[in-house]
Image (spheres, rainbow, N blue to C red):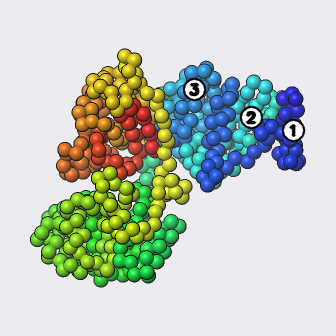
Amino acid sequence: MGIADKLSAGLENGFIDCNLASLDKYNPKLLVNDHKNNIKVLTTIENELRSCDEFFFSVAFVTQSGIISILSILSELKAKGIKGRIITSQYQNFTEPSALRKLLEFENIELRIVTEGNFHAKGYIFRHEDSFSFIIGSSNLTQNALGANKEWNLKLSSMENGSVMQNIIREFDYTFDNATIVDNAWIDAYDEIYNTSKRAGISAARQEENNIIDLQKINPNKMQVEALRSIEALRNSKKDKALLISATGTGKTYLSAFDVKKFSPEKFLFVVHRENIARAAMKSFKNVLGHNISTGMLTGGIHEMDAQYVFATIQTLAKEQILHSFDKDSFDYIVIDEVHRSGAPSYQKVLEYFQPKFLLGMTATPERTDGYDIFDLFDHNIAYEIRLNRALEENMLTPFHYFGVSEITVNGALLDDNADFNHLVCTERVERIAEAAEFYGHSGDRVKGLIFCGRKEEAKTLSQEFNEKGYSTLALTGENSEDDREEAIERLETDDSENHLDYIFTVDIFNDVLIPRLIQIHDSGTARKAA
């Protein structure tokens, strides 16, 4: 069967009778993102790129996350000498300069941008040995459009001389020829325009968000509703404690606030391990219960103990004179945040002292390696579980990219956990880690990453090596105090260009911490990128 016959069979299957025999490769397809069935528009684009002889993209918007989605494949195409042409637009200044810079690193790709008008064309064209395939629809070159958003795209195949294919090629060529050539000089000029537009947009968005919080009632999401029902069912069955297992970033604090509002305690206690978390929790509770509720902080030099809703750090609360200034039944409802820490003496002292009507423990990581049984502490009353996979499926978390970088060998020896220390910190390995981090990049204005190491000496030496390369890093281990860790996290999260950290090298801490735009580089040399 020749290519024309295969294409004809595919068209008959797609537009006349789906029961007719044909090759799936040539069948017309509707491409959508469907996380429940593990279907993404991105998957088809990846497959087409891997098999094409040339590619042409016409998209209104390009983001760094979108480029990262296909970065590994673009590298493969570059190595094979497969050429491509990409058109994007400056419409609404949405296309990210960092994405354009990344594309310029590929000398096999010609890049143009439409700077005037409302350019909305979205198409992906692939030339194969004996035919073309193309995807026309709604997906831009962004992570969400290729993997999460509700998108409709139609994939078809054609011979080069087909009238539709000729029209597509003609339209692409005309737009490409009349678009602006993108080079570093153009991006430098656009960068200032983009950042000005972005700052204005952020300011407007924050104002709108504040208005929404002030004017509208905050309601629980689908998973929080399910969790609240489960907690209520436990109380109805005379249970006085419950464990909520919820991945970091899924709204545990808001969930607890919704339940506290339903419970309506005369006096409430929220226990955390850091002051800034206590303040953030207090703000979340006010958003749910109202800004007129009586709230107080119990941390450091602030002892607002008479408030109806008290937000306390464990370090302050566990002090004898503070703890025993409360009656054992002072609080009707107590929430212990990050309750996996409750094996520590300070937490044990607090838990053994108070006798609330209801105790809620919240954690993302109940399974501990120190032997302490969190489940037993709560009589195995698991209120609800929001694990990472489902949180991603429900769009509660920022999606991430995962890249595996091949292992490195030095003098014929594979570097792994058991490698000689001198090999783990050798120049070749440091270069490999830095190159991988720079190539795969990051989302956002700058990198904010953790580098997990297997040994304290390794973390300290690698941090020193990275600093000598111009990065801003430090090493944190179990030897560092909580104050050291808190300061390091603040420097990692800050946007202050003078005092920020690019990376924290760490051993045995932060295993349960997720920081936005995280790059993790494991001690084996494997790089992960999470946007």
Q: Residue at x 41, y 62 (%)?
A: 245
Question: Badge 1, how many Cα within 10 Å: few under 14, some, many 20+?
Answer: some
487 left or right of 256 in image: left
Identify the residue position indicated by label 2 in the image.
Answer: 133
* On-image quarter of the N terminus: top right
- How much space separates mark 3 and mark 1, taking CA atoms? 32 Å
Badge number at residue 365: none
**Amino acid tagged 2:** Ser
Image coordinates of residue 112 in percent, x first then y, are 59, 31
Q: Between label 2 and label 3, give the one nearer the viewer.
A: 3
Image coordinates of residue 275 in percent, x first then y, are 24, 60
Identify the residue position indicated by label 3 in the image.
Answer: 76
**Amino acid tagged 1:** Ala
Which image quadrant is residue 48 in? Answer: top right
Identify the residue position indicated by label 1 in the image.
Answer: 9
Does label 2 or label 3 sit earlier along the sequence? Answer: 3
- How much space separates mark 1 and mark 2, taking CA atoms? 15 Å
The secondary structure type at the circle numbered 3 is: helix
Image coordinates of residue 249 in percent, x first then y, are 41, 57
Which image quadrant is residue 60 in? Answer: top right
Q: Residue at x 75, y 24 (%)?
A: 129
Q: Residue at x 22, y 45 (%)?
A: 478
Question: Badge 2, how many Cα within 10 Å: few under 14, some, many 20+?
Answer: many
